[in-house]
Image (cartoon, rainbow, N blue to C red):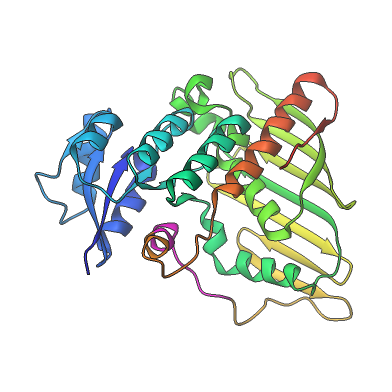
Amino acid sequence: MERIRVGFIGCGGNASGHIGRIHEMKDAEVVALCDPSADSLDRARTRNDGLPADIPTFDNHKDLLANVELDAVEISTPHTLHFEQITDALDCGLHVLSEKPMVCTVEHAHKVIAHAQDAGKILMVSYQRHLQPVYRYLRNQIACGEMGEIQFITAMQDQGWYRGTMGLWRQKLSLSGGGQLNDSGSHLLDIVLWMTGLAVDEVQAYVENFESEVDINSALSLRFKGGALGNISVIGNAPSGGMWEDITIYGSKAAAYIRNGHLTYKAAGSDAAEPANLPGAMSPDRNFIDAIRGRDEVQVPPICGLRVIELTEAAWESARTGQPAKVTTC
Protein backbone atom coordinates (compact mmCIF):
# COMPACT_ATOMS: atom_id res chain seq x y z
CA MET A 1 0.00 0.00 0.00
CA GLU A 2 1.48 3.32 -1.06
CA ARG A 3 1.58 5.96 1.63
CA ILE A 4 -0.37 9.21 1.26
CA ARG A 5 2.18 11.99 0.71
CA VAL A 6 1.34 15.03 2.83
CA GLY A 7 2.93 18.46 2.73
CA PHE A 8 2.52 20.96 5.55
CA ILE A 9 1.83 24.62 4.88
CA GLY A 10 2.55 26.36 8.17
CA CYS A 11 4.79 24.75 10.79
CA GLY A 12 4.15 26.84 13.91
CA GLY A 13 3.10 25.48 17.27
CA ASN A 14 -0.40 24.55 16.13
CA ALA A 15 0.98 22.44 13.27
CA SER A 16 3.24 20.38 15.51
CA GLY A 17 0.51 17.96 16.57
CA HIS A 18 -0.70 17.50 13.01
CA ILE A 19 2.82 16.79 11.76
CA GLY A 20 3.43 14.31 14.55
CA ARG A 21 0.20 12.41 13.93
CA ILE A 22 0.81 12.05 10.19
CA HIS A 23 4.44 11.08 10.82
CA GLU A 24 3.35 8.23 13.10
CA MET A 25 0.92 6.74 10.55
CA LYS A 26 1.93 3.68 8.55
CA ASP A 27 -0.19 4.69 5.55
CA ALA A 28 0.83 8.35 5.30
CA GLU A 29 4.07 10.32 5.38
CA VAL A 30 5.28 13.87 5.83
CA VAL A 31 7.18 14.73 2.64
CA ALA A 32 7.67 18.52 2.83
CA LEU A 33 7.40 21.47 5.18
CA CYS A 34 6.66 25.11 4.45
CA ASP A 35 6.89 28.15 6.70
CA PRO A 36 8.34 31.65 6.27
CA SER A 37 10.09 31.23 9.64
CA ALA A 38 13.32 29.21 9.62
CA ASP A 39 12.94 28.75 13.39
CA SER A 40 9.50 27.18 12.94
CA LEU A 41 10.89 24.80 10.32
CA ASP A 42 13.74 23.80 12.64
CA ARG A 43 11.35 23.20 15.55
CA ALA A 44 9.06 21.11 13.36
CA ARG A 45 11.97 18.84 12.47
CA THR A 46 13.36 18.53 15.99
CA ARG A 47 9.95 17.88 17.62
CA ASN A 48 9.29 14.92 15.34
CA ASP A 49 12.03 12.33 15.62
CA GLY A 50 12.51 10.37 12.45
CA LEU A 51 11.69 13.08 9.95
CA PRO A 52 14.44 12.98 7.32
CA ALA A 53 17.17 15.51 7.99
CA ASP A 54 16.99 16.49 4.33
CA ILE A 55 13.19 16.79 4.14
CA PRO A 56 12.41 19.54 1.61
CA THR A 57 11.56 22.86 3.22
CA PHE A 58 10.18 26.04 1.68
CA ASP A 59 9.39 29.56 2.78
CA ASN A 60 6.28 29.93 0.62
CA HIS A 61 3.54 27.53 -0.33
CA LYS A 62 3.72 28.11 -4.07
CA ASP A 63 7.26 26.73 -4.20
CA LEU A 64 6.24 23.70 -2.17
CA LEU A 65 3.33 22.96 -4.52
CA ALA A 66 5.50 23.40 -7.61
CA ASN A 67 8.44 21.27 -6.49
CA VAL A 68 7.15 18.31 -4.46
CA GLU A 69 4.99 15.36 -5.50
CA LEU A 70 2.05 15.39 -3.09
CA ASP A 71 -1.34 13.80 -2.54
CA ALA A 72 -2.54 16.21 0.14
CA VAL A 73 -1.66 19.24 2.23
CA GLU A 74 -2.49 20.33 5.74
CA ILE A 75 -2.73 24.09 6.33
CA SER A 76 -1.96 25.74 9.68
CA THR A 77 -1.29 29.37 8.85
CA PRO A 78 -2.71 32.81 9.73
CA HIS A 79 -6.39 32.76 8.90
CA THR A 80 -6.55 35.25 6.03
CA LEU A 81 -3.97 33.18 4.12
CA HIS A 82 -6.18 30.09 4.02
CA PHE A 83 -8.25 31.10 1.00
CA GLU A 84 -5.30 31.47 -1.37
CA GLN A 85 -3.52 28.40 0.00
CA ILE A 86 -6.62 26.19 -0.24
CA THR A 87 -7.31 27.45 -3.74
CA ASP A 88 -3.76 26.85 -4.93
CA ALA A 89 -3.67 23.34 -3.44
CA LEU A 90 -6.97 22.40 -5.09
CA ASP A 91 -5.64 23.81 -8.37
CA CYS A 92 -2.81 21.29 -8.04
CA GLY A 93 -5.27 18.41 -7.57
CA LEU A 94 -4.57 17.92 -3.87
CA HIS A 95 -6.78 17.03 -0.93
CA VAL A 96 -6.82 19.70 1.78
CA LEU A 97 -7.17 19.69 5.56
CA SER A 98 -7.35 23.27 6.83
CA GLU A 99 -7.12 24.53 10.36
CA LYS A 100 -10.01 26.66 11.56
CA PRO A 101 -11.47 28.97 10.52
CA MET A 102 -11.65 27.51 7.03
CA VAL A 103 -11.71 31.02 5.53
CA CYS A 104 -12.62 34.48 6.79
CA THR A 105 -15.54 35.51 4.55
CA VAL A 106 -18.75 33.88 3.38
CA GLU A 107 -17.80 34.68 -0.21
CA HIS A 108 -14.53 32.80 0.12
CA ALA A 109 -16.27 29.86 1.79
CA HIS A 110 -18.62 29.43 -1.15
CA LYS A 111 -15.71 29.65 -3.58
CA VAL A 112 -13.53 26.99 -1.93
CA ILE A 113 -16.49 24.62 -1.49
CA ALA A 114 -17.37 24.91 -5.18
CA HIS A 115 -13.70 24.54 -6.12
CA ALA A 116 -13.30 21.33 -4.12
CA GLN A 117 -16.45 19.89 -5.66
CA ASP A 118 -15.30 20.75 -9.18
CA ALA A 119 -11.86 19.29 -8.51
CA GLY A 120 -13.28 16.13 -6.95
CA LYS A 121 -10.99 16.54 -3.95
CA ILE A 122 -11.55 16.44 -0.19
CA LEU A 123 -11.68 19.73 1.67
CA MET A 124 -11.91 19.23 5.43
CA VAL A 125 -11.77 21.58 8.42
CA SER A 126 -9.89 20.64 11.58
CA TYR A 127 -12.76 20.99 14.07
CA GLN A 128 -11.62 18.13 16.26
CA ARG A 129 -14.66 18.07 18.52
CA HIS A 130 -16.60 16.31 15.74
CA LEU A 131 -14.37 13.32 16.44
CA GLN A 132 -14.53 13.37 20.24
CA PRO A 133 -16.86 11.00 22.13
CA VAL A 134 -18.92 13.46 24.20
CA TYR A 135 -19.90 15.63 21.26
CA ARG A 136 -20.56 12.69 18.95
CA TYR A 137 -22.80 11.11 21.58
CA LEU A 138 -24.83 14.26 22.07
CA ARG A 139 -25.22 14.87 18.35
CA ASN A 140 -26.61 11.34 18.01
CA GLN A 141 -29.01 11.86 20.93
CA ILE A 142 -30.37 15.01 19.34
CA ALA A 143 -30.55 13.57 15.83
CA CYS A 144 -32.53 10.52 16.93
CA GLY A 145 -35.00 12.60 18.94
CA GLU A 146 -33.96 11.46 22.43
CA MET A 147 -33.77 15.06 23.65
CA GLY A 148 -37.00 16.09 21.99
CA GLU A 149 -37.31 19.55 20.48
CA ILE A 150 -34.30 21.73 21.21
CA GLN A 151 -35.56 24.87 22.93
CA PHE A 152 -32.61 26.72 24.44
CA ILE A 153 -28.81 26.64 24.17
CA THR A 154 -26.24 28.46 26.24
CA ALA A 155 -22.53 28.23 25.50
CA MET A 156 -19.51 29.98 27.00
CA GLN A 157 -15.79 29.93 26.36
CA ASP A 158 -13.21 31.84 28.37
CA GLN A 159 -9.50 32.12 27.75
CA GLY A 160 -6.64 34.48 28.51
CA TRP A 161 -6.48 35.08 24.78
CA TYR A 162 -6.05 38.87 24.90
CA ARG A 163 -2.84 38.82 26.90
CA GLY A 164 -1.57 35.60 25.38
CA THR A 165 -1.74 36.88 21.80
CA MET A 166 -0.49 40.45 22.29
CA GLY A 167 2.05 41.33 19.62
CA LEU A 168 1.23 38.20 17.60
CA TRP A 169 -0.48 37.83 14.24
CA ARG A 170 -3.72 36.73 15.92
CA GLN A 171 -4.39 40.35 16.93
CA LYS A 172 -3.50 41.76 13.50
CA LEU A 173 -6.72 42.01 11.51
CA SER A 174 -4.94 41.67 8.17
CA LEU A 175 -3.71 38.21 9.16
CA SER A 176 -6.29 36.94 11.64
CA GLY A 177 -9.46 38.17 9.95
CA GLY A 178 -10.92 38.79 13.42
CA GLY A 179 -10.39 38.21 17.11
CA GLN A 180 -11.17 35.37 19.49
CA LEU A 181 -14.62 34.86 17.97
CA ASN A 182 -12.89 33.93 14.71
CA ASP A 183 -10.13 31.96 16.46
CA SER A 184 -10.81 29.79 19.52
CA GLY A 185 -14.45 30.90 19.47
CA SER A 186 -14.81 29.34 16.04
CA HIS A 187 -14.71 25.93 17.73
CA LEU A 188 -17.57 26.90 20.04
CA LEU A 189 -19.80 28.18 17.24
CA ASP A 190 -19.09 25.09 15.17
CA ILE A 191 -19.83 22.53 17.85
CA VAL A 192 -23.12 24.17 18.86
CA LEU A 193 -24.31 24.25 15.25
CA TRP A 194 -23.04 20.75 14.45
CA MET A 195 -24.37 19.00 17.55
CA THR A 196 -27.83 20.53 17.36
CA GLY A 197 -28.23 20.60 13.58
CA LEU A 198 -29.95 23.97 14.01
CA ALA A 199 -29.58 26.98 11.73
CA VAL A 200 -29.42 30.48 13.15
CA ASP A 201 -32.02 32.92 11.85
CA GLU A 202 -30.93 36.12 13.63
CA VAL A 203 -28.17 37.32 15.93
CA GLN A 204 -27.81 40.36 18.17
CA ALA A 205 -24.17 40.78 19.09
CA TYR A 206 -21.99 43.02 21.21
CA VAL A 207 -18.20 43.01 21.18
CA GLU A 208 -15.44 44.61 23.22
CA ASN A 209 -12.05 45.14 21.61
CA PHE A 210 -10.35 46.88 24.53
CA GLU A 211 -7.27 48.40 22.83
CA SER A 212 -6.95 45.73 20.15
CA GLU A 213 -7.96 46.04 16.50
CA VAL A 214 -9.87 42.75 16.81
CA ASP A 215 -12.71 41.50 19.01
CA ILE A 216 -11.73 40.19 22.44
CA ASN A 217 -15.07 39.64 24.22
CA SER A 218 -18.23 38.76 22.28
CA ALA A 219 -21.81 38.33 23.47
CA LEU A 220 -24.24 36.76 20.99
CA SER A 221 -28.00 36.34 21.46
CA LEU A 222 -29.44 33.95 18.91
CA ARG A 223 -32.81 33.06 17.48
CA PHE A 224 -32.71 29.79 15.59
CA LYS A 225 -34.94 28.84 12.71
CA GLY A 226 -37.75 26.84 14.26
CA GLY A 227 -37.90 29.04 17.35
CA ALA A 228 -35.14 27.88 19.70
CA LEU A 229 -33.20 30.59 21.52
CA GLY A 230 -29.59 30.74 22.62
CA ASN A 231 -26.68 32.69 24.00
CA ILE A 232 -23.02 32.33 23.08
CA SER A 233 -20.36 34.16 25.10
CA VAL A 234 -16.71 34.27 24.07
CA ILE A 235 -14.49 35.88 26.70
CA GLY A 236 -10.95 36.62 25.61
CA ASN A 237 -9.68 38.50 28.65
CA ALA A 238 -10.25 35.85 31.31
CA PRO A 239 -7.96 36.48 34.31
CA SER A 240 -6.68 32.91 34.41
CA GLY A 241 -4.74 30.93 31.85
CA GLY A 242 -5.98 27.97 29.86
CA MET A 243 -9.48 27.62 28.49
CA TRP A 244 -12.86 26.80 30.01
CA GLU A 245 -15.99 25.88 28.09
CA ASP A 246 -19.58 25.35 29.23
CA ILE A 247 -22.33 24.20 26.87
CA THR A 248 -25.87 23.48 28.04
CA ILE A 249 -28.62 22.28 25.72
CA TYR A 250 -32.25 22.14 26.84
CA GLY A 251 -34.64 19.91 24.93
CA SER A 252 -38.28 19.11 25.61
CA LYS A 253 -37.29 15.61 26.82
CA ALA A 254 -33.81 16.06 28.29
CA ALA A 255 -31.03 18.47 29.14
CA ALA A 256 -27.31 18.05 28.51
CA TYR A 257 -24.52 19.81 30.39
CA ILE A 258 -20.98 19.82 28.99
CA ARG A 259 -18.45 21.24 31.43
CA ASN A 260 -14.98 21.46 29.89
CA GLY A 261 -15.55 18.34 27.84
CA HIS A 262 -17.35 16.31 30.54
CA LEU A 263 -20.99 15.46 29.83
CA THR A 264 -23.84 15.12 32.31
CA TYR A 265 -27.16 14.07 30.79
CA LYS A 266 -30.56 14.38 32.46
CA ALA A 267 -33.64 12.93 30.82
CA ALA A 268 -37.08 13.93 32.10
CA GLY A 269 -37.98 11.83 35.14
CA SER A 270 -34.42 10.51 35.58
CA ASP A 271 -31.43 11.45 37.66
CA ALA A 272 -28.53 13.27 36.07
CA ALA A 273 -25.79 10.87 35.00
CA GLU A 274 -22.65 10.63 32.92
CA PRO A 275 -23.46 8.47 29.88
CA ALA A 276 -21.63 5.20 29.42
CA ASN A 277 -20.66 3.53 26.16
CA LEU A 278 -19.64 6.72 24.40
CA PRO A 279 -18.53 6.53 20.76
CA GLY A 280 -14.85 6.18 19.98
CA ALA A 281 -12.47 9.01 19.14
CA MET A 282 -9.98 9.80 16.41
CA SER A 283 -7.96 12.76 15.25
CA PRO A 284 -8.89 14.94 12.27
CA ASP A 285 -5.64 13.81 10.63
CA ARG A 286 -6.64 10.14 10.89
CA ASN A 287 -10.09 10.88 9.47
CA PHE A 288 -8.53 12.92 6.66
CA ILE A 289 -6.25 10.07 5.56
CA ASP A 290 -9.04 7.49 5.90
CA ALA A 291 -11.35 9.67 3.81
CA ILE A 292 -8.71 10.02 1.08
CA ARG A 293 -8.42 6.23 1.02
CA GLY A 294 -12.21 5.81 0.89
CA ARG A 295 -12.35 4.09 4.28
CA ASP A 296 -14.43 6.74 6.03
CA GLU A 297 -16.59 9.76 5.35
CA VAL A 298 -15.22 13.23 5.96
CA GLN A 299 -16.38 14.04 9.49
CA VAL A 300 -15.90 17.81 9.16
CA PRO A 301 -16.99 18.79 5.64
CA PRO A 302 -16.48 22.37 4.44
CA ILE A 303 -20.17 23.20 4.94
CA CYS A 304 -19.27 23.38 8.65
CA GLY A 305 -16.73 26.10 7.89
CA LEU A 306 -19.35 27.95 5.88
CA ARG A 307 -21.93 27.81 8.67
CA VAL A 308 -19.42 29.22 11.17
CA ILE A 309 -18.37 32.17 9.03
CA GLU A 310 -22.01 32.91 8.15
CA LEU A 311 -22.78 33.35 11.85
CA THR A 312 -19.50 35.15 12.56
CA GLU A 313 -19.99 37.69 9.77
CA ALA A 314 -23.56 38.35 10.90
CA ALA A 315 -22.38 38.83 14.50
CA TRP A 316 -19.76 41.35 13.40
CA GLU A 317 -22.38 43.19 11.35
CA SER A 318 -24.76 43.31 14.32
CA ALA A 319 -22.01 44.59 16.61
CA ARG A 320 -21.10 47.28 14.08
CA THR A 321 -24.66 48.54 13.56
CA GLY A 322 -26.10 47.87 17.01
CA GLN A 323 -29.00 46.07 15.35
CA PRO A 324 -29.95 42.40 14.95
CA ALA A 325 -28.55 40.80 11.81
CA LYS A 326 -30.03 38.00 9.74
CA VAL A 327 -27.85 34.96 9.19
CA THR A 328 -28.07 33.99 5.55
CA THR A 329 -27.66 30.25 4.93
CA CYS A 330 -27.83 28.42 1.64
Q: Nearer the viewer, residue 34 or 303?
A: 303
Figure label count: 0
User: Where does residue 190 sit, x and y in percent of width and height?
Assistant: 63, 49
Residue 42 against residue 49 in the figure, above or below: above
Identify the residue at horizontal 76%, vertical 54% (top origin). 198
**Left of 171 or right of it: where is 310?**
right
Identify the residue at horizontal 66%, vertical 44% (top origin). 307
Q: Picture quarter containing residue 197?
A: bottom right
Q: Picture quarter containing residue 272?
A: bottom right
> Where the N terminus falls, by quadrant?
bottom left
Identify the residue at horizontal 28%, vertical 64% (top origin). 25
**Left of 289 or right of it: where is 195?**
right
Q: Nearer the viewer, residue 310 or 245?
A: 310
291 in magenta: no
> Where the C terminus falls, by quadrant?
top right
Q: Given the current orientation, which residue lies at the most extreme left position?
A: 54
Q: Nearer the viewer, residue 306 or 324?
A: 306
Identify the residue at horizontal 64%, vertical 54% (top origin). 191
**Left of 279 or right of it: where is 93?**
left
Q: Picture quarter containing residue 286?
A: bottom left
Q: What is the span of residues highlighted in magenta in the rendered image?
A: 279-288
Can residue 183 be seen at all in this image of the molecule? yes
Can residue 99 be seen at all in this image of the molecule? no
Residue 70 against residue 272 in the figure, above or below: above
User: Where does residue 239 sit, x and y in percent of width and height?
Assistant: 61, 37
User: Where does residue 165 sit, x and y in percent of width and height?
Assistant: 48, 30
User: Where does residue 262 sit, x and y in percent of width and height?
Assistant: 63, 66
